[in-house]
Amino acid sequence: MYQDRIVLCASNAYEKKYYMNPDFSSLPASIQDELKIMCVLFTEEIGGVLSLVFEEDGSLSFDVAANEEDLLFDEIGSVLKVKQLQQAKEELLESLEMFYRVFFLGEEFSEQP
């Protein structure tokens, strides 16, 4: 069903907008809220556009982009902030990857030792 990269959610500092892919509306509201807070706070602090994207293999990646003329975008800060979020939200991100693999890619659920 899903073969390319699929956007889970995105936040845009330029347009002051947040997007949640409707295909993931079955996620609990608390998780949707946590994603929204995480993404919006990132773009408010760093600037640019942050997208959480599922790769073809089911892994979740952070895509950060900025307009070339945006002199206020903090490129170094964006890399550091992504690493911080990946550590702080590790359990959430792993759970989202498992959810995607099971419900969207049709893989069997298996608990890792």
Image: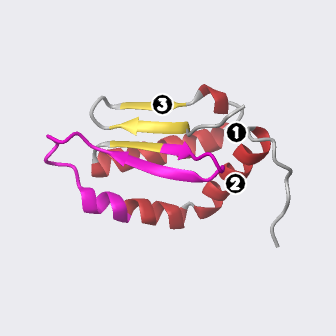
| Residue located at (36% from left, 65% from top) | 80
First in sequence, mark 2 or 1: give its number: 1
- Give me the C-alpha separation between circle 2 and circle 3: 20 Å
- Give me the C-alpha separation between circle 3 and circle 1: 16 Å
User: In the image, what residue type sits under mark 3?
Assistant: Tyr
View extreme (top): residue: 22
* Label 2 residue SS: helix
Q: Which residue is mark 2?
A: 95
Quadrant where the N terminus lies? top right
Q: Quadrant of residue 56?
A: top right
* Label 3 residue SS: strand
Q: As rendered, which of 60 and 22 lies closer to the eye?
A: 60
**Dot 2: few (<14), some (14–19), or many (≥20) neighbours within 10 Å?**
few
Q: Nearer the viewer, mark 3 or mark 1?
A: 3
User: In the image, what residue type sits under mark 1?
Assistant: Pro
Q: Position of residue 76 (x, y in %)?
A: 27, 62
User: In the image, what residue type sits under mark 2?
Assistant: Ser
Tell me, yes or no, whether the highlighted magenta stretch contains residue 55: yes
Q: Which residues are magenta?
A: 52-80
| Residue located at (29% from left, 51% from top) | 46
Tag 2 near tag 3, CB within 8 Å = no
| Number of marks in the rendered image | 3
- Give me the C-alpha separation between circle 2 and circle 1: 12 Å
Q: Which residue is mark 1?
A: 28
| Residue located at (74% from left, 47% from top) | 101
Q: As rendered, which of 10 and 55 lies closer to the eye?
A: 55
Q: Nearer the viewer, mark 2 or mark 1?
A: 2
Q: Quadrant of residue 27?
A: top right
Q: Which residue is mark 3?
A: 19
Against 77, residue 105 (above or below) is above
